[in-house]
Structure formats: structure tokens, C-alpha cells
């Protein structure tokens, strides 16, 4: 079975998380810089049998589109052109960064970087739970 990757995009960093082969569990993976994304995906798609990439979609609490929401839409459109063999899904990520900060308190720069991948794992786990139980 194929694995699923999640991205928690930000202006400075992109958190990533990957599922197990059964698509039941999400695990924080890496935090990367935005300019590293295409090469990172090229390598990971080749080595981890990725067929779907879930992208955090930060709607506002009112459910409207913000500038950051538009950036996720643009990222999906751009990546779909570069990696047409991959299914890209936008997934509501409201409050995931806040949840990640509660899971692991950031005591230093390394912890703050790891929070991005924890947020991606939360996004991915909610996606997996929804698809598993529907």
C-alpha cells in the first residue's frame, strides 16, 4: 500500500509527516525550508512510494479564505503541475499549530522546528482518521 505525506506549509518552514504503509498512523518526519520542497518531494516520492500528499489548508475560524489559505491553494496548484502522478488534497488545519505547541513545548530552536512536523502529523492523522472511518 502507498504511504501518504502531509505538508504544513509556512513562510519560513514546511513541516512534513508521513503515514505508515497501512495508512493508519501519522508520524512527524522533517521540517524543511520552502526552497527545498521540490527536491525533498522528488526524493521522497521515489523512495517512500508516496501516492497522496495532504496539504494543510488554513481557513480562518469563520471558514473564509485568508492570504495564507491562498498560499496553500497556490502551492497545491504548483505541485500538481510538477508532480502530476501524485494526488494532492487540501485539508483543514485550523488549530493544528496550537495543538502541536501543547503536545511538545518549544524550549529551543530545535523544538520550535520540530513543532512544524508535529503540526503536519496532526493534519495527516485527522485525514487518515476521516478516511479510515468513513
Image (cartoon, rainbow, N blue to C red):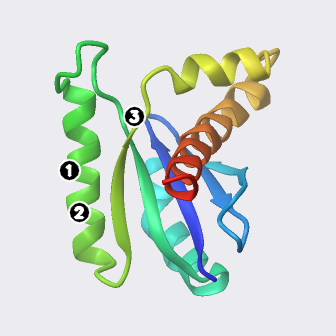
Residue designated by label 3? 11
State which quarter of the image contains the N terminus: bottom right
Q: In what element is the residue under mark 3?
A: loop
Residue 83, picture quadrant: bottom left
For label 1, the crowd category at 10 Å Cα-Cα, with few meaning under 14, some 14 to 19 and many 20 or more, is: few
* Residue 108 visible here: yes
- The x, y position of residue 62, in whole percent, is 23, 13
Residue designated by label 2? 78
Q: Is residue 65 left or right of residue 28?
A: left
Q: Are marks 2 and 1 in contact (CB under 8 Å)?
A: yes
Residue at 29%, 76% in the rendered image: 82
Residue at 34%, 30% in the rendered image: 58
Residue 10, picture quadrant: top left
* Residue 32 visible here: no
- Label drawn at residue 124: none
Residue designated by label 1? 74
- The x, y position of residue 3, in whole percent, is 61, 72
Residue at 68%, 30% in the rendered image: 115
Sequence-wise first label, 3 or 2: 3
Amino acid at each position: 500500500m502507498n504511504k501518504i505525506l502531509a505538508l504544513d506549509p509556512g513562510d519560513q518552514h514546511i513541516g512534513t509527516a508521513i503515514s505508515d504503509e497501512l495508512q493508519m498512523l501519522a508520524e512527524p518526519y522533517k521540517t524543511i525550508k520552502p526552497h527545498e520542497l521540490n527536491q525533498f518531494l522528488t526524493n521522497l516520492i521515489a523512495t517512500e512510494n508516496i501516492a497522496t500528499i495532504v496539504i494543510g489548508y488554513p481557513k480562518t475560524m469563520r471558514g473564509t479564505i485568508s492570504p495564507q489559505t491562498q498560499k496553500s491553494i497556490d502551492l497545491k496548484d504548483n505541485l500538481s503541475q510538477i508532480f502530476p502522478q501524485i494526488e494532492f488534497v487540501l485539508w483543514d488545519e485550523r488549530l493544528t499549530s496550537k495543538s502541536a505547541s501543547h503536545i511538545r513545548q518549544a524550549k529551543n530552536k530545535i523544538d520550535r522546528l520540530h513543532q512544524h512536523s508535529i503540526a503536519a502529523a496532526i493534519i495527516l492523522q485527522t485525514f487518515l482518521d476521516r478516511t479510515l472511518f468513513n
